[in-house]
Image (tube, rainbow, N blue to C red):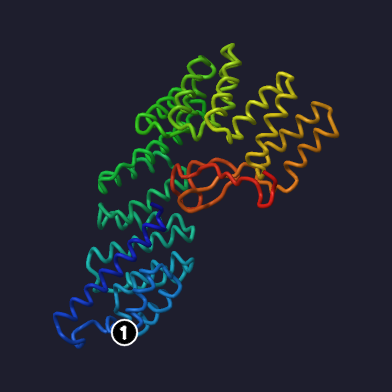
Amino acid sequence: MTDTALLAVLLAAIAGLLAGRAWAAARRRGDSRDRPPYRVSPHYTQGLHYVAAGQRELAISELTKVAREDPEALEVLQILGNLLREAGQVERAIQVHQGLLARSDLTRAERAYALASLGTDFSKAGFIDRATRTFEEVLEVDPKSIHALVGMQKLHEDQRQWQEAYTVQTRLSRLRKTEDSLVLGHLQAEMGREALQAGRIDAAEKAFRTALSLDRRVFPAHLGLADCQAGRDPRQAAAVLEDAVQTSPERAYLAFDRLALAYADSGEPSRFVGLCEQTIRQDPRDWRARLALARHLGREGRHEEAFGLLLRAVEANPQVLLPHLEMWRTLRAMGLEGEVVDRYIATAEESAFYRDPHVCTACRYRADDMLWRCPHCHEWNTFVEERLGPTAGAKS
């Protein structure tokens, strides 16, 4: 679940809790004279309704009226501040939370929550140092604050402080009693990638193996481990990549280039042809396997066979730019015009191009390449290939 979705659920739960408490209080007292002033406001009831319905702007409008009528309405101000932040009104959110912290009547838990909310405001606004100091202050008051730990963990990730993020995530997993091995594995893979880039092969290999021991689905760990072994043992590198393909067949295309090189270095280039053909048999609409095989055949001078594969790849996913680019290279290599070019144009003429579209399944953020962590919702392992298919009205 994304942070935004989690906040929506939390706010809805708080709204339901507050409404339930108000109803129970009314039942006990029999009238409205002893209720907090804000609970008898129609804006309060309507605001809670909008929160539960996910209508953020309307909820902000109604709860702002409640806060204006009753500036002491702590619970309302807590909800309002978080809603403002999620609506992009970070400056107002900061003002609300700073106003709460200026009060002398807050309990320890209320102060910790308001501080953590302020830290999240600072983080959203890009004030990294202030956010870090605020979260640290929360953890001094409440070392088990989930709110502050989540904020710290995201800050570490955003700053590529992978070891620190791993430590905080481990702490969070213990506190929440959740299974976060996939996230922990990706953090280890990032540590391995940085070690590999720095030339620390042994440290990189250790990190990649740790990632895979946490969760075999951490695909970049397979890729990184293969890179560590490619220079000294291409057959072992190929075995690692084959295991990756077997574990996550939907991501097999990410290993194609490495596999082609590993097979060639092992003196067995034909194995790559067999892998691509098997992939195509398993999924006749797999344009990536056709593209990879076409490139391989093109390097061997088998341009006519490559052309046939590329034509099928374009038919399977005409909006993606990569097979079109490879098609032009193949046509140039063939030195052909006329009928061959006409066939290609007939397939591609109504297409809208995306180079290599991927989409986050958590927030629908789109990217032109595979990303392991979404830059929008910050979730791990949520990107998948976006298959758009032929445009409406195109010939089948």
Foreground of the two, 354 or 377: 354
Q: Position of residue 293 (x, y in %)?
A: 64, 26
Of the pair 122 and 6, the residue shown nearer to us = 6
Which residue is drawn at the image coordinates 45% and 24% (left, top)? Answer: 243
Q: Is residue 133 above or below residue 296?
A: below
Q: Quadrant of the C terminus?
A: top right
Amino acid type for the residue under numbered disc 1? Ser
Q: Which residue is mark 1?
A: 41
Q: Is residue 234 above or below residue 52?
A: above
Classify residue 253 as left or right of residue 355. Answer: left
Taking the image as drawn, is residue 261 in sight?
no
Where residue 358 appears, as percent x and y from the top left, is 56, 44
Please give the name of the residue rendered at 25% of the width and 58% of the height, measured from the top-left corner: 141
Report x, y in % for residue 325.
Answer: 72, 36
Depth order, front residue of 344/139? 344
Q: Is residue 124 visible?
A: yes
Residue extending farthest to the front is 396
Q: Quadrant of residue 368?
A: top right
Q: Is residue 106 above or below residue 253?
A: below
Look at the numbered disc 1 and give the secondary structure of its residue: loop
Residue 336: quadrant of the picture: top right
- Residue 23, given in percent of the width and then of the height, sits at 22, 77
In the image: residue 386, left or right of residue 182: right
Local packing at callout 1 (Cα closer than 10 Å; few below 14, some 14-19, many 20+) is some
State the residue at coordinates (56%, 19%): 262
Q: How many marks?
A: 1
Residue 370, picture quadrant: top right
Residue lying furthest top in this view? 267
Q: Is residue 297 above or below residue 114?
A: above
